[in-house]
Amino acid sequence: MELAGITAETPNPSGGEIVRDSRGEAIGVFEERAMGLVTAAYAMYRDSLSQEALKEEWLKGIELAQQECLAKGITSFQDAGSSQEEVEWYKELAEQGKFDLRLWAMIRHRYPDIKDKLVACPLLMPATAFSLVVLSNRKWMVL
């Protein structure tokens, strides 16, 4: 929020809301069009990271999310917006025995951009219930 210049004085944009605490300070939740206020700053931050740093950041997030899910008894989830690269990273985690959740992943790329990469059907991970569902241009594929 600091990088995006969000302060207590930042007005809510049309069609969105910055969620605030009782003192009027933004708490880090941006609803609807308010998300656009932080999107550009976040994109600039991510662009400054190396591929290795991006993967490490993603892996740490998945590790923390998995711990939280399992601690609360959640054993499966859906990811409606995975990249092809993230699907490969999920696969690596599963093959290493480091992914203990069931996952339905939906790739966010357009079908023409990924059709040549969808040759392995179904994608079954050893010792895991990893599944990949692709919704692209209104076509469903289960891998």
Image (cartoon, grey):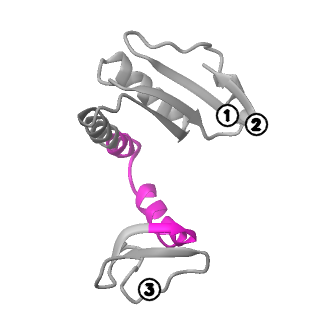
Mark 2: few/some/many CA within 10 Å (<14, 14-19, 20+): few
Q: Amino acid at mark 3?
A: Thr
In the displayed structure image, the side of residue 35 where residue 51 appears, left or right: left
Q: Quadrant of residue 21?
A: bottom left
Q: State the separation of the CA atoms marked 1 and 3.
A: 37 Å
Judge whether residue 50 is colored magenta: yes
- The disc, 3 or 2, on the residue closer to the chain's N-terminal end is 3
Q: Magenta span: helix, strand or loop, mainly?
A: helix
Q: Amino acid at mark 2?
A: Arg
Q: Residue 79 magenta-drawn?
A: no
Q: CA distance from mark 3 to mark 2?
A: 38 Å
Q: Secondary structure at mark 1?
A: strand
Label disc, if present, on residue 135 of the rendered structure: 1
**Residue 12 vertical position relative to residue 133 in the rendered view, above or below:** below
Q: Residue at x 23, y 35 (%)?
A: 71
Which quarter of the rendered picture does the N terminus lie within? bottom left
Residues in magenta, as a range:
30-58
> How far apart are the two marked residues, 1 and 2, measured between alpha carbons?
6 Å
**Relative to residue 40, is residue 79 depicted above or below?**
above
On residue 138, the disc is 2
Three-letter amino acid code of the residue under disc 1? Leu
